[in-house]
Amino acid sequence: MDEKVTTHQAQDDARNDDILVWVDGQMRPRAEATVSVFDSGFMLGDGVWEGLRLYDGRWAFLDEHIDRLFEAAKAIDLDIGMGRDEVISALLETQNANHMTTDAHARLMVTRGVKSRPFQHPSLSRQGPTMVIIMEHSKPKIPRPIRLATVPHMRGLPMTQDPKLNSHSKLNCILACIAAEKAGADEALMLDVHGFVNTTNACNFFIVRKGEVWTSTGDYCMNGITRAKVIELCKANSIPVFERNFSLVDVYGADEAFLTGTFGAQTPVAEVDGRIIGTGDMGPMTERIRALYKDLIETDQSQNT
């Protein structure tokens, strides 16, 4: 069997050994970039985050990512303690400190901060939020299309843990990923509470059938920014696209399948549950959407220069 791959696999880059990490307003070397063991994020997964991608000196769809960060913080009643411009300034400061111009990935994380005692009540977080920005030189290197395995773990209902949140509490998705790995796959395909195909543990999921592009309704998954851009591109280029319920039977008989996410943009899927999807290689619709997305990135960069 080919080597195991992940949807966030990147080329090795020795420069990442010497990156500087933004921690509460200070630039710290990688080995010294630490937070307290009493931090809400470490202790309870109490926080939100965003992943952003740098192309040719510009952060792609920056406004949408910052909007989502602040909306998520508001949803969990977390005061970031900074305004939008200050957050963007911290991002750019980290970029400049690391001399990054393109092919970089940033993970911006905000937690409820250091707790006075090791228990869950939010009122015990009295020192204000903790904010960290990790930025790495990161060029995707996925040597082959991804293999998926359907797992019993679901993206749940909003009244349990809303799957639309980019929460630090990722154990459900981690368990799904472990189950897929035990089944010999690269990533997990997760169903929704009704048994319809939903998302993977880390990316949004699309299939192509007879010239149509399908993805889930979005009711039980992270409504990814890349996912939304792909839907918009399809509509703008006369590609039939549907947010709908569909089953594993529809997936197994699909002509193509691909994943979307900030890191990998559009990643082709070779097989699901041992069934080869299409030819097992990247299909023509996925190639077309990738090209359209690349053009969109370039247009976004030029408009924001």
Image: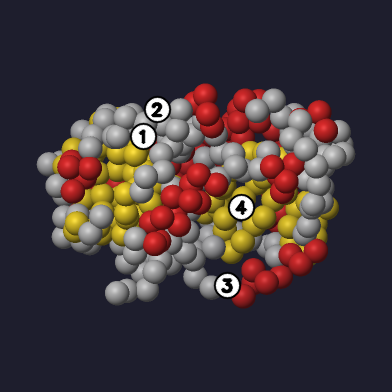
Pointer 2 with pointer 1, Cβ within 8 A: yes
Q: Amino acid at mark 1?
A: Asp
Question: Mark 4: which secondary structure?
Answer: strand
Which numbered disc, 1 or 3, marks the residue closer to the eye?
Answer: 1
Quadrant placement of the N terminus: bottom left
Q: Which residue is mark 2?
A: 219
Q: Quadrant of residue 80?
A: top right
In the image, residue 257 sits, relative to residue 64, either above or below, namely below
Mark pair 1, 3: CA separation:
37 Å
Closer to the N terminus: mark 2 or mark 1? 1
Which numbered disc, 3 or 2, marks the residue closer to the eye?
Answer: 2
Which residue is rendered at x = 43% and y = 37% of the image?
155
Q: Which label belongs to residue 192?
A: 1
Question: Mark 1: which secondary structure?
Answer: loop
Q: Which label belongs to residue 106?
A: 4
**Left or right of residue 236: residue 201:** right
Closer to the N terminus: mark 3 or mark 2? 3
Task: Specify few, some or many for label 1: CA neighbours under 10 Å numbering under 14, 14-19, or 20 or more.
Answer: many
Q: Amino acid at mark 4?
A: Ala
Q: Which residue is mark 3?
A: 13
Pointer 2 with pointer 4, Cβ within 8 A: no
Q: Amino acid at mark 3?
A: Asp
Is residue 294 at least partly visible in the picture? no
